[in-house]
Amino acid sequence: MNEQRAQAYVNLIEQLLACTNDEELNNILQANQEFIDPDFLQVMENYATGLK
């Protein structure tokens, strides 16, 4: 995974955390389907660990 993709994952995570309703969440997920992969899940787990 390159640095640009890692940053895109973090940006997506932050967008998802800022969602205020399900419709907005679904729109963001649909618009970013290419980023939903095992690497994204790993970055999400690492991000969540950092929030603890």
Image: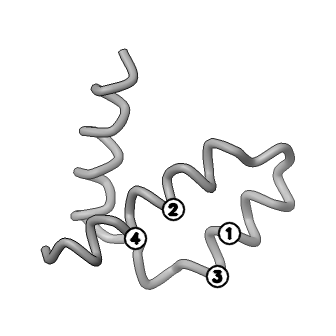
Position of 35 compared to 39: left or right? right
- Label 4 is placed on what type of residue? Ala
Q: Which residue is mark 2?
A: 12
Please, is residue 1 above or below residue 17 in the view? below
Tell me the distance, in whole angstroms, between the alpha carbons under discs 2 and 4: 6 Å
Residue at the far left in the pictured view: 1
- Is 47 on the left or on the right of 1, as rendered? right
Q: Which residue is mark 4?
A: 8
Looking at the rendered structure, the secondary structure element under dot 1 is helix
Camera-side mark, 2 or 3: 2
Say if mark 3 contacts mark 1, CB within 8 Å.
yes
Residue 44 location, x and y as percent? 35, 47
The reply to whether the C-beta atoms of the residues labelled 2 and 1 are less than 8 Å apart is yes
The Cα–Cα distance between marks 4 and 1, rounded to whole angstroms, is 13 Å
Q: Residues within 10 Å of mark 1 (few under 14, many from 20)?
A: some
What is the number of the mark on residue 31? 3
Q: Is residue 35 above or below residue 24?
A: below
Amino acid type, callout 2: Leu
Residue indicated by mark 1: 28
Residue at the (31%, 54%) spot, across then down: 41
State the quadrant of the N terminus: bottom left
Looking at the image, do the residues carrying marks 2 and 4 touch, with CB atoms under 8 Å apart? yes
Label 4: how many Cα within 10 Å (few below 14, some 14–19, many 20+)? some
Is label 3 in a helix, a strand or a loop?
A: helix
